[in-house]
Image (cartoon, rainbow, N blue to C red):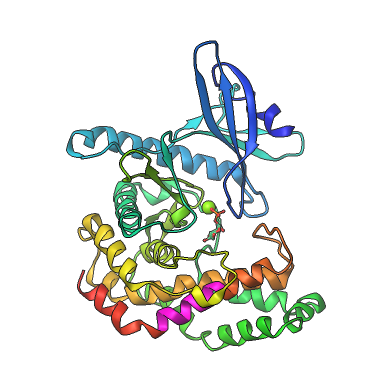
Amino acid sequence: MKAALIAQQFVVAGRLVTADTTGQGNVNDTFLVIFRTTFSEERFILQRINKRVFPKPEYVMENMRVVTEHVHRRLEEEAHLSDRIWQLPRIIPAKDGRDYVVDGDGEYWRAISLIASAHSYEKVQSPEHAHEAGFVLGQFQRLISDIPPEKLHDTLIGFHVTPGYLKKLDDALTTAAGQERLKSSTEAQRCYRFIQDRREWCSVLEQAQVEGKLKLRPIHGDPKIANVMIDDATGKGTCIVDLDTVKPGLIHYDLGDCLRSCCNPVGEEATDLSHVVFDTDLCQTIMRGYMIFAKSFLTEADRYYLFDCCRLIAFELGLRFFADFIAGDVYFKTHHEGQNLNRARVQFKLTESIETREPIIRKIFSGT
Ligand code: GN1
Ligand code: MG
């Protein structure tokens, strides 16, 4: 198997035992690799970076180097102040000294250390879990807040710029195949109408940024619950993984993504839509965790747009899934026909739930 051959090109002690697929990421391919020596075992994560999504994987790795070194240094400096051991995976170098291996097909592979005795979950397990997701995000945003923006490449141009995804949808609909998919079901047509009704509003964060009300800062970009590692022994968050999209952006993208992911208890792949709701109790709990660090860096203007980001990122992800369905599933990995359409319906149901609960969600934000 290719992953097994590639795994042996990184600096790891011992001999290869297995390299099996793991995780449920929608973009990269991920493998858990086990090496053994005569007296110990080393496990690490091997990933093939999706070049269709990240056209310059070397940029992704240069950013990862900058971010991990920066965060590791800060964590060391602050270790004595903390009640827990915060972690962040390190890059395992290739035997030729680079941070990645390029295979014969031009595919980029990287190896990163495994955060041992910790797990991540596809869905929120409890209010305590939700609290940790907010807390870990606030901590991470704080830790990267002083990385000079010019040190970070833009690994994914247009990421979280919602109007750009409208354009992608419009482009996909100019093709006969796109029109065919739109007409294929009443669900698809309903999704399309849902988007049409929100076209004007969905520039809200970009507009605020153009007007100078919101500023770009280093963000994580993908803080969904599945990227938050929870210590098996204590139930506390230990780190946030998946650093591919760390780059300057609006911190609202992160908070919105954390909320849309954590406050939907049935998760992104739910098939029974009646259970998809935005749980406002979980929202309150996440905000309590998030604010522990974030209260020191959130401005009045940032606070003004909290409800919009909560509504927008759920809507945006639905739009991204839907546009990909119309385009023929070219971006997100799918395992069955119509999966991106179903994912879009889940996010739109969640968006509706957020809209219905607007007064209570706004109250949560103003009280934190
Ligand atoms: C993708 O690959 P993964 O699962 O970490 C996507 C995120 C979405 C997420 C939804 C680079 O993340 O933006 O929120 O799926 N990542 C990219 O599950 O597009
Ligand atoms: Mg990701």
Whole-percent x, y for residue 212 in the image: 34, 72
What is the quadrant of residue 324 in the picture? bottom right
- Figure check: 202 above or below 216: below
Which residue extends farthest top?
38
- Which quadrant of the render holds ligand 1? bottom right
Whether residue 241 appears in this view of the structure is yes
Q: Is residue 45 magenta?
A: no
Give me the residue at 30% from left, 48% from top: 146
Give me the residue at 53% from left, 31% from top: 44
Whole-percent x, y for residue 83 in the image: 21, 40
Left or right: where 42 falls relative to 124? right
Which residue extends farthest left?
81
Whole-percent x, y for residue 269 in the image: 57, 64
Quadrant (top left/top right/bottom left/bottom right) for the N terminus: top right
Left or right: where 74 falls relative to 330? left
Give me the residue at 64% from left, 36% from top: 20
- Figure check: 70 above or below 212: above
What is the quadrant of residue 45 in the picture? top right
Q: Which residues are magenta?
A: 346-355
- Figure check: 346 above or below 144: below
- Figure check: 174 above or below 74: below
Whole-percent x, y for residue 367 in the image: 20, 73
31 or 165: which is nearer to us? 31
